[in-house]
Amino acid sequence: AQTVTQSQPEMSVQEAETVTLSCTYDTSESDYYLFWYKQPPSRQMILVIRQEAYKQQNATENRFSVNFQKAAKSFSLKISDSQLGDAAMYFCAYLDMRFGAGTRLTVKP
Amino acid sequence: DAGVIQSPRHEVTEMGQEVTLRCKPISGHNSLFWYRQTMMRGLELLIYFNNNVPIDDSGMPEDRFSAKMPNASFSTLKIQPSEPRDSAVYFCASSLFWAYTDTQYFGPGTRLTVL
């Protein structure tokens, strides 16, 4: 069975700085998708970024980028120029919507 | 588009009562998902429909839970009878195309409290 692990229950970053959230997963598949979702206090789940495993290039969406290491089964999210609005729970998810436990990100002004 | 709509936003009920959660997916979306989120278990996929047909219900915890999708614009998740351990936030999500590879759009969730 596929599992998704987020080893950082909480992270903190100073506004305008960069933070990296970690995610590892386990799978025997060779082709799959990985996702990062953001859940602000409003509870709504919002897709931040997704990565297709067969693509070697790391996905990027504005200030959000991933470091996808397929051999290591690692999928970290980097947030650059952190903003107060980035404060939220961040969930890593594997193809079949198995979610990690989440990382709570606090942004300090 | 209004996005995925869920109702009610909050539901408080007593143990043993029937609970029905409702979801209206984004118009034109072909796939619909129901999730449950708790502190203990995190976010879990309960069931997934494609073109109104249940494809994967392996996440439904037990027979007290049932889900239907009578048409492309409406789905329900029913718990009968409800128990305190069912207390959670229930999310509905929809996506345009097939399965898990497409972006899912989540509703605001329904917070269920069973006393």
Image (cartoon, coloured by chain):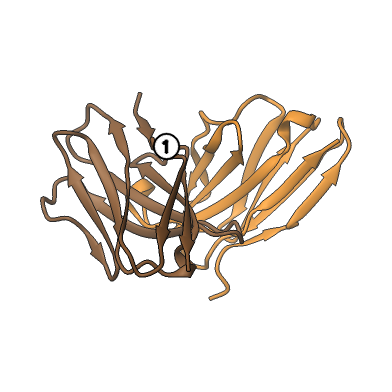
- Residue nearest the viewer, comparing B74 with A51: A51
Tell whether A81 sits left or right of A31. right
Q: Position of residue B66 (x, y in %)?
A: 67, 35
- Residue nearest the viewer, comparing A74 with B71: A74
- Residue nearest the viewer, comparing A18 with A73: A18
**Quadrant position of residue A17:** bottom left
Q: Hey, which residue is sitting farthest bottom in the picture?
A: B1
**Chain identifier for the orange-coloured part of the image:** B
Quadrant (top left, top right, bottom left, bottom right) of the C terminus of chain B? top right
Give chain A's shade: brown
Q: Chain of mark 1?
A: A
Q: Residue at x 30, y 35 (%)?
A: A24
Is disc 1 surrounded by few (<14), some (14 to 19) or many (20+) residues within 10 Å?
many
Q: Position of residue B85 (x, y in %)?
A: 73, 29
SS at circle 1:
loop
Q: Disc 1 designates what residue? A: A98
Q: Hey, which residue is sitting farthest left in the picture?
A: A56
Q: Residue at x 58, y 73 (%)?
A: B2
Q: Is residue B89 above or below residue B62?
A: below
Tell whether A23 sits left or right of B55. left
Q: Is residue A52 above or below residue B17?
A: below
The amino acid type of the residue labelled 1 equals Arg
**Quadrant position of residue A97:** top left
For the image, the number of numbered tags is 1
Q: Residue at x 32, y 43 (%)?
A: A22
Q: Position of residue A98 (x, y in %)?
A: 42, 37
